Amino acid sequence: MRFAMVSAAVSTALVGAAVVFGAGTAAAVEPVAQPDRIGLQLSHEETKSMADGPIPAIVTMFVPLNRIGVGLKADTGIYKDENGGVHASLRQAIMEAANHPDGTITLFVNAPGTRSGRVLDMYQNWN
């Protein structure tokens, strides 16, 4: 039951993000679908808005950090321990991408029982 509530909250946050970003004249949110998850690819401007807005805090109110996966770029400044644990908040990981001139993020909501039990995955992208 808790997972259903968490999934609904995260899905609502992602849909809200798509609506907010989609309202702009040059919105570039791209939906991404895979067999076991759905997501959004954000543009650089959208990534900056996400980093500065309330969505990371809202998501982490409902999703424990150990249920959020973060795909860090090789040249990240965020500490990752020997077990793969990322030692940063969701906002910090998004902000790091936003601070690169071409930085973007991809967010996924995972299907229940997939991806080692993670509810949400976020990937940093930049050149």
Image (tube, rainbow, N blue to C red):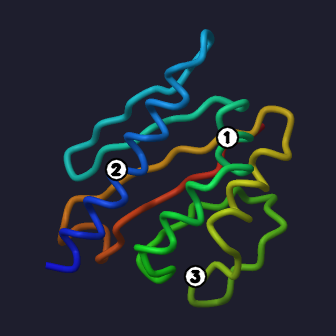
Which of the labelled discs sits on residue 84, or is there none?
3
Query: Residue 54, relative to residue 6: is it above or below?
Result: above
Quadrant containing the N terminus in the rendered view: bottom left
Q: Residue at x 41, y 77 (%)?
A: 67
User: Which sits in the foreground, 1 or 79?
Assistant: 1
Q: Residues within 10 Å of mark 1 (few under 14, many from 20)?
A: many
Q: Nearer the viewer, mark 1 or mark 2?
A: 2
Where does the image place residue 27, in percent across and percent down from the top left?
57, 18
Task: State left or right for residue 112 relative to residue 83.
Answer: left
Q: Which residue is mark 1?
A: 47
Residue found farthest to the bottom: 82
Q: Mark 1 near mark 3, Cβ–Cβ under 8 Å?
A: no
- Count of picture labels: 3
Q: Mark 2 near mark 3, Cβ–Cβ under 8 Å?
A: no
Three-letter amino acid code of the residue under disc 1: Thr
Residue found farthest to the top: 25
Q: Residue at x 62, y 55 (%)?
A: 54
Q: Residues within 10 Å of mark 2 (few under 14, many from 20)?
A: few
Where does the image place residue 31, in percent across and percent down from the top left?
38, 30
Quadrant containing the C terminus in the rendered view: top right
Three-letter amino acid code of the residue under disc 3: Gly
Which of the labelled discs sits on residue 12, or is there none?
2
